[in-house]
Image (cartoon, helix red, strand yellow):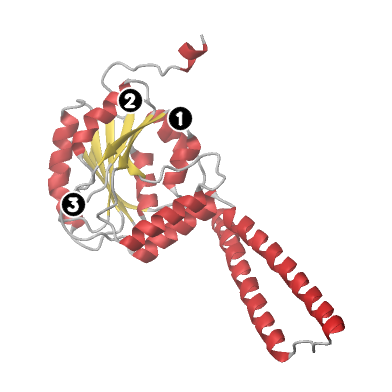
Amino acid sequence: MTALMNAPAARSGTPSISAVVPAYNEAANLPALLQALRDALRGLSPRWEIIVVDDGSRDDTAAAMRPWLQQPGVRYLALSRNFGKEAALSAGLEHARGEVVVMIDADGQHPLALLPQMLAGWRAGADAVCAVRDTRADESWAKRLGTALFYRIVNAGSPMPIPADAGDFRLMDRRVVAALLSLPERNRFLKGLYAWVGFRTEFIRYTPAPRAAGTSSFSMARLLGLALTGVTAFSTMPLRLWSGLGGVIALGAIGYGVDIVIDHFINGSPVPGWPTVVVSLMFFSGVQLLSIGILGEYVGRIFTEVKRRPIYLLRESAGQGLIDPPAA
């Protein structure tokens, strides 16, 4: 009986599908992607929509979108400025009306051939089907090292580990989308939120294709910022680590002080003076400043959250999908 209750319930019928595509300076990639994505969605459902979220692009993304808005099926959301990919994805999820939602990058690296397999996983009972990278050979050694270190830190002692090579390329049931939208965070780290909301998730492997055109807009500084958001949003490990380090340093200082006193009274050695004091002060000052900086990151996140500013602001909305609007 328990096995039957835990078995995923298969789904029948053809769901409506929303495809969310965040775009920042992707004018060269969008025409080919939209053509291929439209053909792929047509083969999966008669009711579909593509939502392109322009995250404050400075190139001709708006001009590249204009011809697509003359025909139903494609919607265009332009944010008032560059809010970042997490905000752009959140905007797309809020405006998506499909029974299932697919998230796809605009650079052409996510293979659309996986969409039927993702939909089959949903029909078999999965609430989310996530594509996991087979390799990171296309990334620099610094990025690979940083990624491995980040996931080791954020997953240390976590009851909800985040898959290391799972990104935003995924298909989600409407229940999962509703759960994500119910979370009030302003500092959003979606890879962590996917894991936090839970639901039955199926993973499939894929090898990312070469970028169709242009270069990635994700600089190392932005990646570090996103990683810092992820660590502070889903782990207290830095605070615990620094607390432990403080305890070790304190015990070491006590031991060193006892050693100096014993050595002075037993061997008559002079008590170390000026150099010892200066080095100790510089060391402990550095430790204190670093500790304050780590604590400040967490306090800064609290400060941002309590202001409750919107995650994004919309400048323009155009186009129409092939999904009937919900009944009033």
Q: Residue at x 16, y 27 (%)?
A: 43
- The amino acid on which the numbered mark 2 sits, given as a three-letter code, is Trp
The quarter of the displayed image where residue 273 is located = bottom right
Q: Which residue is mark 1?
A: 199
Density class for disc 1 (Cα within 10 Å; few <14, some 14-19, many ≥20) is some
Q: Secondary structure at mark 2?
A: helix
Tell me whether the residue at label 2 lies in contact with that at label 1, contact meaning CB atoms closer than 8 angstroms.
Answer: no
Q: Earlier in the sequence, mark 2 or mark 3?
A: 2
Where 133 falls versus 286 (above or below)?
Answer: above
Q: Mark 2 sits on what residue?
A: 122
Give the quarter of the image for residue 98. top left
Q: State the residue at coordinates (68%, 81%).
A: 281
Q: Nearer the viewer, residue 211 or 302?
A: 211
Disc assigned to residue 210: 3
Cα–Cα span, label 3 and label 1: 31 Å
Residue 142 percent across, percent down from the top left: 35, 63
